Image (cartoon, rainbow, N blue to C red):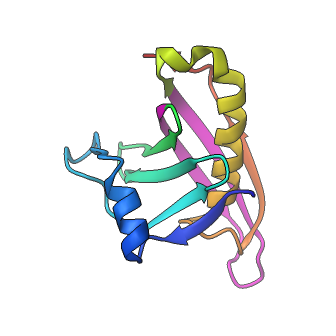
């Protein structure tokens, strides 16, 4: 199974989301529960903490079976939604991987690419024609 975008709108999904006990570094509160990009077969969830305005980068958590990876970066998009010609360019500035997952870094960075590609634009990949992703070397925390 590949990553798909889902609404977090059923009791099961709400419980699943809440069980992560995430806190946004932007607000100091749990992130908004609205959508995520998920690969249930492998157990990975891309969750938005917000950002993307003014000086605040977009911040995400990639929650996996063994930990949470924090991602910060900027997204630029051009094209038209109506004719499905949106081209997205991600400039990721930071990827923070738990030190305990350092041996899996290459695989995790690949999974992150998949998740960001599937995320599309605001958890919608239908209008997206292409996605380019620039990733830095991860930092181990």
Picture quarter containing residue 2? bottom right
Q: Which quarter of the rendering shows the N terminus? A: bottom right
Is residue 111 shown left or right of residue 121? right
Image position, residue 122 (x, y; %): 53, 65
Picture quarter containing residue 18? bottom left
**Count of marks, rendered view:** 0
Q: Please determine whether, in this image, residue 67 is positioned above or below residue 28.
A: above
Q: Please determine whether, in this image, residue 70 is positioned above or below residue 61.
A: above
Q: Outermost residue toward the left?
A: 28
Is residue 10 shown left or right of residue 66? left
Note whether residue 17 is visible. yes
Picture quarter containing residue 125? bottom right
Q: Outermost residue toward the bottom?
A: 82
Residue at 50% in and 16% down: 100
Queried whether the magenta region covers residue 94, the answer comes back as: yes
Between 96 and 77, the residue placed more toward the observer is 96
Q: Which quarter of the rendering shows the C terminus? A: top left
Image position, residue 10 (x, y; %): 41, 77
Between 124 and 36, the residue placed more toward the observer is 36
Queried whether the magenta region covers residue 2, the answer comes back as: no
Residue at 35% in and 42% down: 55
Between 11 and 30, the residue placed more toward the observer is 11
Residue at 49% in and 37% down: 71
Note whether residue 34 is visible. no
Image position, residue 137 (x, y; %): 62, 19
- In magenta, the rendered stretch is 67-95
Name the magenta segment's main secondary structure: strand
Between 8 and 52, the residue placed more toward the observer is 8
Image position, residue 88 (x, y; %): 69, 56
């Amino acid at each position: 199974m590949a990553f798909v975008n889902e609404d977090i709108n059923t009791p099961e999904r709400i419980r699943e989301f809440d069980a992560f006990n995430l806190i946004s570094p932007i607000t100091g509160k749990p992130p908004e529960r609205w959508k995520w990009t998920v690969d249930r077969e492998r157990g990975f969830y891309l969750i938005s903490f917000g950002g993307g305005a003014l000086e605040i980068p977009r911040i995400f958590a990639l929650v996996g079976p063994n930990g949470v990876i924090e991602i910060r970066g900027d997204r630029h998009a051009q094209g038209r939604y109506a004719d499905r010609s949106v081209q997205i360019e991600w400039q990721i500035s930071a990827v923070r991987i738990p030190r305990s997952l350092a041996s899996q870094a290459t695989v995790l960075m690949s999974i992150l690419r998949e998740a960001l590609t599937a995320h599309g634009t605001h958890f919608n990949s239908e209008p997206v024609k292409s996605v380019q992703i620039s990733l830095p070397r991860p930092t181990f925390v």
